[in-house]
Amino acid sequence: MTQAEKEQDNGKDKEKERDREKEKEQQRGVKRPIAPPAIPEPPQEQIQSNFVVVIHPGSRMLRIGRATDTLPVTVPHVIARRHKQSGQPRYEDAWLLREGLNKPESNEQRQNGLKMVDQAIWSKKMSNGVRRTPVSADQARAYNCQIRPAVLDSSSRVKWTNTTHHPPYLVGEEALYVNPTDCYNIHWPVVRGQLNVHAGPGGSLTAVLADLETIWSHVIQKHLEIPLKDLKYYRCILLVPDIYNRQHIKEVVNMLLLNMGFSAIIVHQESVCATFGSGLSSACVVDVGDQKTSICCVEDGVSHRNSRLCLAYGGSDVTRTFFWLLQRAGFPYRDCQLSNRLDCQLLQHLKETFCHLDQDISGLQDHEFQTRFPEAPALLYQVRLGDEKLQAPMGLFYPTTFGIVGQKMSSLQFRSQGDSEDPHDEHYLLATQSKQDQSSKSAADRKAISRPSGCLEGEMSSQGGTGELSDLPRSCGGGGGGGGTQGETELGAAHGESLMGAGEVEEPVSAHLSRKTAIMSQFESKALGLDKAVLHSIDCCASDETKRKMYSSILVVGGGLMFHGVQEFLLHRIINKMPPSFRRLVDNVEVITRPKDMDPRLISWKGGAVLACLDTTQEMWIHQREWHRFGVRMLRERAAFVW
């Protein structure tokens, strides 16, 4: 008998002995421990990046492509749906218009904001050391009121979308060019970074999800040339806002895995993907989009919950303010209307072409622009502009210029309201943790709240409330991973106790919660300027070392702040307003606007593509069969951020 055969026989004998031992134990009634049912580990398989689709849904633009693509497909995130019955009233979601603009105080607020902008422009000297001479709108108005357009061509060669074959829906550019007289409703499914759920037609959560599914499926089939039946061979990476709505994310993941049929998904935050896309390990990410601005400090691929802040304004608010300033200066295209989507497109283009943040550019200057609309001649206009080109983008630093009254302008982290499908959430952990842990956490939170902070001086109440308000995100983010429903302010009794230290402050829970809600409401109604919001976010980081890292790497992404001179302008304001103690400690403050000379609008998407190629993402994939069995618990188990 050979050595190999002997070893084989020995192995068989040992197996038989083990089996006999098990039988004896069962006869004696020995109880073996029962392994608890666990979520299975994902199979470690080699993933091909060309079979991963990266989706970055924005309020105005959808960016989608394979992880191997150099650039994503970018289409307007809009859908036109045909009326199901004749005579149905037409409905169109607003583009540049929004709630809170037509209040009695709006115009006064706009004028006050403009005064602050003019003061800031005058106070900052130009590079030659001379103060800038302000230009009155009346000087430009006298010239612009005399301007008449020149006809370039009797036909603009721009046509309305052909709807003679009665398509049930149209997506992207085709939806934008639907004739207003056609029987179609226009819907933008995402507004200010959240699903556009509202009381009007097509505003239910089910309808919005159906719009998303239709738009994404159409783009995947038409532009990526992937048949929907083949999506079972593809995986998906979904980029979500830093302050997200749990219920909405759950429904979107459900739609991608179960309705569209992707085999697996990774959900990750925009800010973290922005650092991946720019090649930075740590940064304070300032994402200025079309309708919202989100700020968050990211360190080594982790988003600091306490530093997350979302401001309810962006590039479209700058566009609307620019139109108001153009009207003051006698804008020669007098038929321009904010309710007309083609006029909105023109105004976006004019803002991107003319506006800047370079204070060395001064005085009156002549410009020209064309209008090309369907069923109209192509026209050429002359326009003379002065400070309007600088005043409009400065509205991001003085948001009262936007004239928005009575709206929630700042969003912080909130606790989850709980989900019946996810019983072992943070509420469960709070309820089951030991009394000792609770008391130590209360002490830590009290210490955090008592710490003074000067980053919001002048913005909040002047009676000592600044420190407490400044630290709200620190305590509000202490237990929650993301926002609940937008506008929710109920923090729960357990959170309220840990926030204010209920062990020492004796007051009824209801009284405490109402006081807490009042403080939160006061903070959220304030429109923080962009520079103050950046300082506020960095100040909410836990250690001085982390703050130093963030000051030395402020990354600006998104399309809402792509103005000439923005890098120097933002740097100057951050340095001037940062706490004096840090001015001595930070070696250099750096603002990065075009890392690797990339388009800042594509950086987050590119980061999602990088994520698909990393070996470390293997354990983050949520497979379709797992989602079907465990549901939203998989996000708590696999998400790279605290769900």
Image: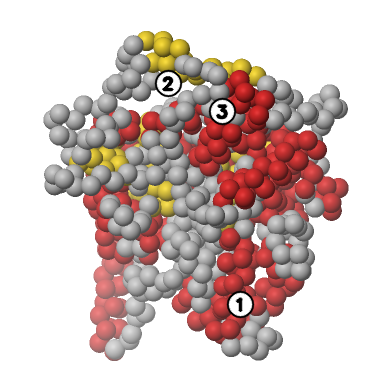
Residue 463 x/y as whole percent: 76, 69
Give the residue type at disc 2. Answer: Thr
Disc number lying in front (1 or 2): 2
Q: How far apart are marks 1 and 3 (CA)?
A: 48 Å
Q: Earlier in the sequence, mark 1 or mark 3?
A: 3
Using a 10 Å C-alpha cutoff, classify the residue at mark 1 as few (fewer than 14 neighbours), some (14 to 19) or many (20 or more): few
**Residue hosting label 2:** 371
Q: Which of 358 and 441 is in front in this view?
A: 358
**Residue 343 placement: quadrant:** top left
Identify the residue position indicated by label 1 in the image: 515
**Residue shown at the point (26%, 49%) measured from the top left:** 210
For label 3, the SS is loop
Q: Is residue 318 above or below residue 383?
A: below
Question: Foreground residue, 546 or 530?
Answer: 530
Label 3 belongs to which residue? 330
Real-space CA distance between mark 3 and mark 2, rounded to the nearest whole angstrom? 17 Å
Mark 1 element type: helix
Closest to the observer, 472 or 232: 472
Residue type, label 3: Gly
Q: Where is residue 144, by image quadrant?
A: top right
